């Protein structure tokens, strides 16, 4: 017999969304809300749990259903049995919780069956798409923070503004907790933050990342898709600049951005020692950007890449997941920022698509570097590099055409944002997918070459 926290400890380490990979969590309950349940023999508990083993401590959102018996077929979602003899189940997979979630979200759907989205996700999305009514997806944030979650705030603002390039926002749920030791809290006053939201589920869409990979692998041009993506990116930026705060960049802002890049590089160098040798060259690109003209600041997507865009069967693109980079503090992700950060993120993503294919082909051929490749393999790599160059140029063309801002005038600044993104990616890969580290490292090395500087 175990306490609820003991039951969660082992189970959490096996969840895709658990951020402290390789470590055992030290859990403390800081928030508990019992939701009305429409099954008399079940109880729904929405728990907020601080993992003090992480530095800074992470705050997890864990909805559970407690039952006195194990329903048929529920074994897979079983968490444990507590000291009161109750069986605990993962709420995301339990209909008692998912129905209650829809009610809390203010979404009325009859006879909707819920299924958990199967993809690699840092949160948990539940799709309600049975029945005759319009399908809905509810996203449960797993790591929660005090304050506004940009995923909810930005998509709500765009929906209210009538924008059709994000799925329509339907509602959100917040939670409250008291955690004097949490990094967000400055006192023992209660904190509030978003726990979940619901939006229109768009059937038949495909993720941009596998689409781009398939095209690059088959040697098919992605220029038409990339150009449309550039246009829709500019259109969403224009909408955000209108419905959310936006202002000219001051000297103080510019100094702050450049200092932020330097700081991120310093942190990244401890995860990725290979960056140390490139430090002076990277810093020279950052410092040059201080002298460049800066476009206005505004709210942006914040972690823009091919995995965050969905293509409708009609070919139109939709943008999702406005949470910003998970490794950045929430306070930074909720400020006005440069739209060039998003542009740079997507440019990096085209390079990533060919980088991941290159890694896979080299691994299959047992090749460690260019010198060990045969002529066919070299030709294939050259063709893929050209695929990425064309997609990047088409994306910029689309953005420029829609925004009427000549991004090529901002080349030096765009390179600095791209370099900062590649440094972030190096840190992300070192922590999460070390075999992919060469992809961003190759980009860092290229972005500081004299050949690249000559193009600015
Ligand atoms: N409104 C939607 N309609 C259809 N599919 C969606 C929708 N929202 C998300 N998805 C699918 O779920 C995936 C994960 O969503 P995302 O918001 O990126 O979650 P996470 O923050 O966990 O990465 C997307 O890549 C997409 O495949
Ligand atoms: O999707 P998240 O918001 O969790 O973003 C994080 O993970 C991404 C990987 O899933 C990572 O993106 C990097 O890899 C992508 C391919 O898997 C590639 O399309 C992106 O261009 C590249 O940055 C992202 O950086 C990270 O924040």
Image: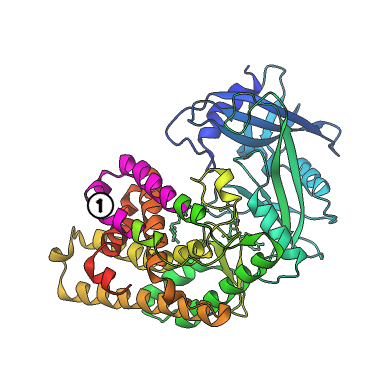
Residue 5 is situated, as x and y percent measured from the top left of the image, at 62, 23
Disc 1 is placed on an element classified as: helix
View quadrant of ligand 1: bottom right
Residue 282 in magenta stretch: yes
296 or 368, which lies in front?
A: 296
* Residue, disc 1: 280
Residue 139 is situated, as x and y percent measured from the top left of the image, at 67, 51
Q: Residues within 10 Å of mark 1 (few under 14, many from 20)?
A: few
Residue 341 is situated, as x and y percent measured from the top left of the image, at 48, 61
> Along the horizontal axis of the image, is 97 left or right of 398?
right
Instruction: Give the overall secondary structure of the magenta segment.
Output: helix
Quadrant (top left/top right/bottom left/bottom right) for the C terminus: bottom left
Quadrant (top left/top right/bottom left/bottom right) for the N terminus: top right
232 or 20, which lies in front?
A: 232
Q: Which image quadrant is residue 448 in?
A: bottom left
Residue located 46% across and 76% down the image: 396
Residue 433 in magenta stretch: no
Residue lying furthest left in this view? 371
Residue 226 seen from this side: yes
Residue 193 is situated, as x and y percent measured from the top left of the image, at 69, 40
Look at the picture and state if 216 lies above or below 147. below
Q: Which image quadrant is residue 66 in?
A: top right
Residue located 21% across and 49% down the image: 277
Residue lying furthest front in this view? 251
194 or 70, which lies in front?
A: 194
> Along the horizontal axis of the image, is 284 left or right of 409?
left
Look at the picture and state if 309 lies above or below 399. above
Residue 93 seen from this side: no
Write down the region rendered in magenta: 257-286
Residue located 59% across and 51% down the image: 335
Count the numbered circles shown.
1
């Amino acid at each position: 017999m175990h306490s609820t926290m003991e039951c969660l400890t082992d189970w959490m380490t096996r969840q895709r969304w658990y951020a402290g990979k390789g470590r055992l969590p030290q859990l403390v309950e800081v928030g508990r809300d019992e939701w009305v349940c429409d099954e008399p023999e079940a109880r729904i508990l929405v728990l907020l749990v601080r993992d003090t083993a992480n530095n800074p401590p992470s705050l997890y959102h864990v909805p559970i259903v407690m039952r006195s018996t194990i329903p048929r077929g529920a074994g897979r979602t079983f968490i444990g049995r507590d000291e009161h003899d109750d069986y605990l189940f993962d709420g995301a997979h339990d209909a008692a919780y998912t129905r209650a979630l829809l009610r809390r979200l203010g979404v009325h759907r009859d006879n909707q069956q819920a299924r958990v989205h199967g993809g690699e996700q840092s949160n948990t999305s539940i799709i309600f798409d049975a029945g005759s009514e319009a399908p809905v997806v509810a996203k449960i944030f797993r790591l929660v923070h005090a304050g506004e979650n940009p995923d909810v705030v930005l998509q709500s603002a765009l929906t209210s503004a009538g924008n059709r390039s994000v799925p329509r926002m339907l509602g959100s749920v917040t939670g409250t907790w008291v955690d004097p030791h949490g990094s967000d809290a400055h006192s023992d006053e209660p904190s509030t933050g978003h726990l979940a939201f619901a939006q229109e589920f768009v059937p038949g869409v495909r993720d941009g990342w596998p689409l781009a990979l398939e095209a690059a692998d088959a040697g098919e041009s992605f220029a038409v898709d990339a150009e449309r993506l550039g246009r829709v990116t500019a259109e969403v930026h224009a909408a955000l600049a209108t419905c959310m705060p936006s202002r000219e960049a001051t000297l103080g802002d510019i100094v702050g951005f450049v200092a932020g890049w330097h700081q991120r590089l310093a942190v990244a160098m401890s995860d990725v020692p290979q960056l140390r040798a490139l430090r002076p060259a990277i810093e020279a690109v950052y410092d040059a950007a201080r002298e460049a003209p800066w476009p206005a600041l505004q709210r942006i997507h914040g972690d823009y890449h091919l995995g965050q865009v969905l293509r409708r069967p009609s070919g139109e693109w939709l943008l999702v997941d406005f949470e910003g980079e998970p490794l950045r503090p929430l306070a930074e992700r909720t400020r006005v920022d440069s739209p060039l950060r998003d542009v740079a993120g997507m440019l990096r993503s085209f390079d990533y698509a060919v980088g991941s294919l290159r890694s896979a082909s080299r691994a299959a051929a047992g090749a460690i570097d260019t010198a060990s490749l045969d002529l066919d393999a070299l030709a294939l790599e050259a063709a893929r590099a050209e695929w990425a160059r064309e997609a990047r140029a088409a994306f910029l063309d689309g953005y420029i055409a829609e925004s009427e801002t000549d991004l090529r005038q901002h080349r030096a600044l765009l390179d600095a944002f791209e370099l900062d993104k590649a440094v972030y990616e190096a840190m992300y890969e070192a922590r999460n997918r070390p075999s992919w580290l060469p992809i961003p490292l190759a980009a860092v090395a290229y972005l500081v070459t004299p050949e690249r500087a000559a193009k600015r």
